[in-house]
Structures are given as C-alpha cells and as structure tokens.
Image: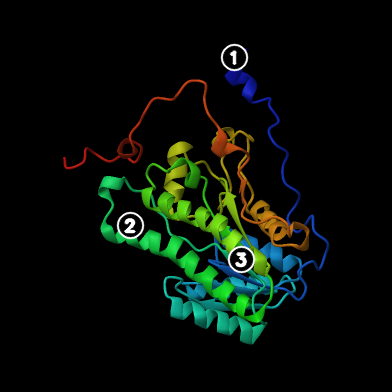
C-alpha cells in the first residue's frame, strides 16, 4: 500500500467544538464595547458573532450598508446590542465619525478588531498603480488610521484597550500573486510589534491574528476561483470545504470561521492581558509546511492561466 493510500486513514486534527460554544465564561464581554471593521461579512462577521455570544456590545463597520444591516439584525439575535455604521477606513475623518457614533451608542470601544482589507490575485507585472494603492491604502493605511484613532481616544481618557489586527501568513513568507497584499500585511504585522511597545505603558494591547484556509460564503469570486483551481468544484453547501481542500492541509481539514472568532475573544479577554506584540496564526500549521522535494515551479501567470506578458 502506498503512502498516498495511507493518507486516507490518517485522522488529522480533531473537528472544532460545535457552533455556539466557547472556552470563555458566559458573559465575559458584558459591558464591553467591541468595534469590528469589515464586520458585515465573512471572517469579520464570524469574529463579531463570538464576541456577541459572550455579551459584548458590538459596532460593525464596513463599506456596504445593506450587508451591514443584514449582519446587524443577525448578530442582534444573539442577545447583545449591535450598531452598524458605514465606513471607508481610508478616510481618517470618516473614522473619527465612526468612533463618535460608537461612543454615542454604547461608549468608547474597549476592543478594536481591524479586519477590513482588500485583496485579489494578480501577477506583479500586470498590477496597475491604482490596484497597488487601493490594496495598500485599505489594508495598511486604513488599519493604522483606525488603530491611531482608537489609541488617541484611550490615551486621552487614560483607559486601557485591546487591538487585534487580522494579518496573513505571507507577511513572513511573501505572497507570489499577491505582492500588494503581502507588502501591506507585512506592514500590519510590524505595526503590531511596534505599537505594542509604544502603548503598553498606557494599558493598550496590540496583537495580530492570522487565519488559515476557512472557506465561507462571502469569499470573493477571485479567491473562490483560486480554491477551485486547487480542488475542482464539487456539489456542496455555500462556503463548505471540498474533500480535496482538506487533503491539502497538514491538519487534513480546513478551518471553521468560528475558530478564528474564538482566538480573537481569547486575545482580547482578561485571560490574555500579558500577551501583546504577538501574532497568532490559526491555520493548522499550513503556512509552515515544506515538502522534502520541491514541487515543479509554475509561474504565477501559469497558475492563473495567463499568457506570456506582452504577448
């Protein structure tokens, strides 16, 4: 029997606990205000969900008002108070307005989750200046502007706070096909390490959180197409993983979005007060995987089915 055949009998990492469960005590976040950017969809909403289950007052921000309203209604069904506010995080003036709205609704946010970002696959030589600026402006500049506004208000008030920046593993490794996002996420990781030292004396934690492959129904068509190239589509529920995607992970399964939410609620909780300047990777060790023999080199253009540049 070949090694490949034996793969099917390996157990992989255990499945996560069921939805609606938490390692933290019920009510851990009662009286705590949590602001989540990009909180209307995908992993941002999954993070917001876990804070809501633990009693937090939520403020979700994003660019698409209709999605924010739908998410607000869904999250409010978990029992907590939820406010939704449109925001373009590239605009510092608009960010200030979001914080004003949050304070008017529930008080100064105690926790900031910087989840909003932009990304799409493109060979670097095909990338337009506008594409580069857009991704860097949202992912890096927007994260800094949000974090700065959060910190300035806490510094003025003399109150502690917790920031979690959602990162990406290619901040360490580089990201062929995602030069704009990889560069921006490397900056986000550096912000975690820099600002944790600057603001630690004032009681402000700054940490990072990196998701692995966690399929969900809000994935962009570009990202979904990348997954389909890796594992041909099969009949499945929206957002569900296909078997071949599981087999491509060291854990022999993809992640569940709630697993990222659980990690976020821990990092911002009273049980993680001495953790700051750290970026936690929640990806089943996929980013650390290396083969004994390097696979055949296929250019980014080839992987994306693009012809010769300039041809």
Q: Which x, y percent locates residue 82?
A: 65, 77
- Do residues under tags 3 and 2 come within 8 Å of each other at their CB atoms? no
Residue at 26% from the left image edge and 56% from the top image edge: 128
- Mark sitting earlier along the chain (1/3): 1
Gap between marks 3 and 2 measured at Cα:
30 Å
User: Split into 4 quadrants, where in the image is the N terminus?
Assistant: top right
| Residue at the farthest top position | 1
Residue linked to disc 1: 2
Crowding near pointer 1: few (<14 within 10 Å), some, many (20+)?
Answer: few
Nearer to us in this view, 308 or 161 = 161
Q: Is residue 27 above or below residue 187?
A: below
User: Split into 4 quadrants, where in the image is the C terminus?
Assistant: top left
Residue 134 visible in the displayed image? yes
**Quadrant hosting residue 5:** top right
Disc 3 secondary structure class: helix
- Mark sitting earlier along the chain (3/2): 2
Q: Which x, y percent locates residue 116?
A: 50, 63
| Residue at the farthest right position | 25
Q: Which x, y percent locates residue 265?
A: 70, 60
Residue at 53% from the left image edge and 53% from the top image edge: 167
Q: Is residue 170 left or right of residue 46?
A: left
Residue 204 visible in the displayed image? no
Q: Is residue 178 above or below residue 84?
A: above
Residue linked to disc 2: 132
Q: Which mark, by number, is residue 216?
A: none
| Residue at the farthest bottom position | 104
Residue linked to disc 3: 199
Q: Is residue 205 left or right of residue 145?
A: right
């Amino acid at each position: 029997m070949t090694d490949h055949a034996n793969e099917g009998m390996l157990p992989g990492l255990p499945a996560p606990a069921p939805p609606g469960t938490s390692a933290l005590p019920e009510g851990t976040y009662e009286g705590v205000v949590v602001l989540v950017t990009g909180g209307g969809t995908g992993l941002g909403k999954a993070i917001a969900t876990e804070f809501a289950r633990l009693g937090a007052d939520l403020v979700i921000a994003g660019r698409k008002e209709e999605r924010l309203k739908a998410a607000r209604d869904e999250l409010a069904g978990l029992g907590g108070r939820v406010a939704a506010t449109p925001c373009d995080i590239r605009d510092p003036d608009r960010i200030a307005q979001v914080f004003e709205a949050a304070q008017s609704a529930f008080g100064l946010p105690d926790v900031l989750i910087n989840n909003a970002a932009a990304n799409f696959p493109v060979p670097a030589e095909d990338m337009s200046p506008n594409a580069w600026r857009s991704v860097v402006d949202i992912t890096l500049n927007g994260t800094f502007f949000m974090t700065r506004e959060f910190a300035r208000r806490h510094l003025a008030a003399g109150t502690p706070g917790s920031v979690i920046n959602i990162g990406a593993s290619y901040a360490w490794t580089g990201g062929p096909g995602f030069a704009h996002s990889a560069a921006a996420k490397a900056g986000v990781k550096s912000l975690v390490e820099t600002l944790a030292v600057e603001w630690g004396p004032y009681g402000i934690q700054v940490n990072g959180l990196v998701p692995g492959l966690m399929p969900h129904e809000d994935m962009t068509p570009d990202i979904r197409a990348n997954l389909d190239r890796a594992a041909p589509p099969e009949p499945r529920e929206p957002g569900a993983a296909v078997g071949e995607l599981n087999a491509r992970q060291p854990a022999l399964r993809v992640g569940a979005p709630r697993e990222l939410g659980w990690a976020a609620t821990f990092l911002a909780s009273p049980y993680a007060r001495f953790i700051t300047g750290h970026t936690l990777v929640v990806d089943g060790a996929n980013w650390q995987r290396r083969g004994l023999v390097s696979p055949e080199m296929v250019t980014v253009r080839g992987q994306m089915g693009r012809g010769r540049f300039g041809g």
